[in-house]
């Protein structure tokens, strides 16, 4: 498909080629992106330009010296890390307040959140880390935000049901794609090598506002299968509690409890493992020496007879209690 670019684009491109310093290059790239029409034929080009732009900006930031550069990262804690993402004012910070112990600033003007803020969300007997972030805005989002999105275990995309959730999703998708972050379920045939495919839970917030129902219906008509949407009101706390178990499922983890022969299991301290983990993975997780010494295990749960012997390659399920025998 042809890109069909207007002549002003080529002027900006020439400015880019002739630019003498990075600031000029950034300005020219921004102009090229602004001029470029939005259609399928320009998708690849746009993504390429975005990448060059963010690389240039990153280099500029680094040159400025560490004193002035904000390069935030968030130490991982708990059973998994979920990053909140969305356009300005969709209620990300409000949602963090509902689900965690954190107290971010919530306000009706955009850009209230400028630094990452982490909070721990309780789900049954475990804690999941949620990270609130500044909104994604075309060409104004700092690189560290994308770094956090890339390294998180999954994303929680918050859309504003009182506005235009369809175009919010499209905006976010495009901005993420420009940074090689692809929502799972959105992988096309030609995903760029090195892309980060991210599991994502879509939440439509502000269900208490008048246009929410109508906008949800429109959204569902377009995206029901590809991107199922959960409607909540963070302000009124409606349907928010259900997000805890949805996020737990999305993380694809399981909780197992180890016990010593003749002792009761520690039910308040599960070992967290990836779905599909085996008895051997559990042994590795508890102590590296256990792998060599492990002879067999006994299992409670999994629909097995209590105390049944299982082999090292036995696939664990959430809630299993395991006795390792050396
Ligand atoms: N009516 C309504 N307003 C909300 C809801 N959640 C957040 N808000 C309001 O939307 C504005 C932006 O919220 P905030 O959490 O700061 O958004 P953020 O920019 O995405 O972090 C604030 O004025 C909130 O009070 C909701 O569920 N219903
Ligand atoms: Mg915020």
Image (cartoon, rainbow, N blue to C red):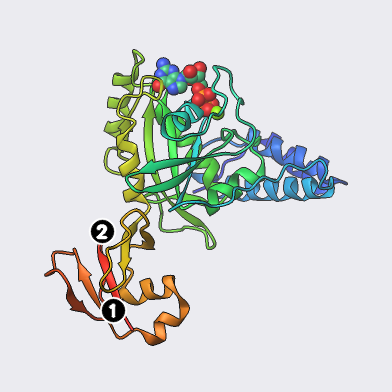
Q: Is residue 36 left or right of residue 267?
A: right
Q: Is residue 18 left or right of residue 204?
A: right
Which residue sits at x=52%, y=33%?
A: 102
Q: Which quadrant: the C terminus? A: bottom left
Q: Is residue 104 left or right of residue 271?
A: right
Whether residue 89 can be seen here: no
Q: How far across and down, in percent of the image, does residue 53 sit?
A: 69, 46
Foreground of the two, 60 or 69:
69
* Among numbered discs 2 and 1, the one appearing first in the sequence: 1
Q: Is residue 213 left or right of residue 22?
A: left
Q: Residue 319: which numbered mark, if any?
A: 2
Instruction: Determine if the C-beta at disc 1 is less than 8 A from ligand 1.
Output: no
**Going by the picture, which residue comes out furthest to the top?**
210
Which residue sits at x=31%, y=43%?
A: 245
**Going by the picture, which residue comes out furthest to the right?**
20
Foreground of the two, 260 or 93:
260
- In this rendering, the label closer to the viewer, 2 or 1: 2
State whether residue 210 is above or below residue 85: above
Other-residue count near label 2 (Cα within 10 Å), few / some / many at <14 / 14–19 / ≥20: some
Q: Quadrant of residue 188?
A: bottom left
Which residue sits at x=19%, y=63%?
A: 301
Q: Residue 313: which numbered mark, if any?
A: 1
Q: Determine the CA span between mark 2 and mark 1.
A: 17 Å
Q: How far across and down, in percent of the image, does residue 36 sit?
A: 61, 37
């Amino acid at each position: 498909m042809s890109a069909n670019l207007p002549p002003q684009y080529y002027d900006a491109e020439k400015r880019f080629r002739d630019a003498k310093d990075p600031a000029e290059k950034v300005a020219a790239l921004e102009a090229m992106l602004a001029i470029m029409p939005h259609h399928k034929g320009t998708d690849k080009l746009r993504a390429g330009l975005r990448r060059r732009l963010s690389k240039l900006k990153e280099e500029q930031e680094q040159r400025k010296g560490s004193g002035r550069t904000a390069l935030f990262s968030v130490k991982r804690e708990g059973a998994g890390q979920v990053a909140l993402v969305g356009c300005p004012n969709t209620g990300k910070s409000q949602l963090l307040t509902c689900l965690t112990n954190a107290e971010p600033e919530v306000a009706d003007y955009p850009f209230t959140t400028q630094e990452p803020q982490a909070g721990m969300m309780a789900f049954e007997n475990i804690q999941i880390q949620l990270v609130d972030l500044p909104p994604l805005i075309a060409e104004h989002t700092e690189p560290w935000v994308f770094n956090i999105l890339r390294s998180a275990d999954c994303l929680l995309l918050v859309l504003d049901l009182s506005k235009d959730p369809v175009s919010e999703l499209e905006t976010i998708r495009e901005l993420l794609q420009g940074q090689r972050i692809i929502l799972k379920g959105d992988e096309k045939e030609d995903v760029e090598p090195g892309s980060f495919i991210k599991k994502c839970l879509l939440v439509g917030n502000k269900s208490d506002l008048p246009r929410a129902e109508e906008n949800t219906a429109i959204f569902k008509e377009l995206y029901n299968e590809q991107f199922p949407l959960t409607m909540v009101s963070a302000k009124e706390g409606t349907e928010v509690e259900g997000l805890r178990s949805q996020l737990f499922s999305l993380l694809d983890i399981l909780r197992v409890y180890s016990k010593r022969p003749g002792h009761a299991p520690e039910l308040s301290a599960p070992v967290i493992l990836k779905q599909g983990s085996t008895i051997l993975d559990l042994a590795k997780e508890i102590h590296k020496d256990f792998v060599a010494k492990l002879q067999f295990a006994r299992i409670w749960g999994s629909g097995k007879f209590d105390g049944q012997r299982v082999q090292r390659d036995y696939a664990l399920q959430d809630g299993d209690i395991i006795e390792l025998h050396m």
